Amino acid sequence: MTSAAESITESLRRSRQLMVQEVERSANTLSTFDESTSVLRKAEGEYQGHRSLLMRTRGLLSTMQRQDVLDRIILTIGFLVFSLAVLYVVSRRIGLLTLQRKLADAIRSGSVSAGDILAKVQEGPAPTDAPPIYDEL
């Protein structure tokens, strides 16, 4: 009976030791879960901060895209106005060159003398109801 009691006592000691080990393992697991929960809460806070930053960045990017489109429109209109001004100046300049060519041809052909042209220039501008000199050529 003593040996049976010792055997049972030894068995109980081993069971107790196993239970202590399981309790320690459960405590370690619980501690790890607590640390994981703390890390996850920190990550959630950082995510919320980044989320607001990303939303602000998205708003700024959309504003920049709208501004880019507006800038392109303004540049296109400016280039168009500049091109039209250049075209106008060139056409007026070519018109003056054509007038100069016509006057030179008229002087060479003898239909108009250089003195007549100088006299008309010295008279001043033609009256508004009279046609300009270059229309007579």
Image: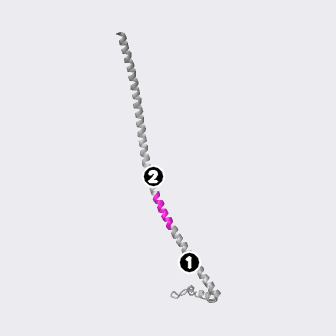
Q: Residues within 10 Å of mark 1 (few under 14, many from 20)?
A: few
The residue where tag 2 is placed is 57
Query: Residue 120 is drawn in which quadrant?
Result: bottom right
Pointers 1 and 2 in contact (C-beta within 8 Å): no
Q: Which residues are magenta?
A: 64-77
Say whether residue 54 is left or right of residue 136: left
The CA span between labels 1 and 2 is: 52 Å
Where's the C terminus, which quadrant? bottom right
Question: Which residue is drawn at the image coordinates 53% and 70% (left, top)?
Answer: 83
Question: Which residue is drawn at the image coordinates 46% and 58% (left, top)?
Answer: 65
Vertical side of 70 occupied by 59: above or below: above
Q: Is residue 41 magenta?
A: no
The disc placed on residue 112 is: none
Amino acid type of disc 1?
A: Arg
Residue 95 at what x, y percent from top left?
A: 57, 79
In the foreground, 21 or 43: 21
Which of the two discs, 1 and 2, sits closer to the camera?
1
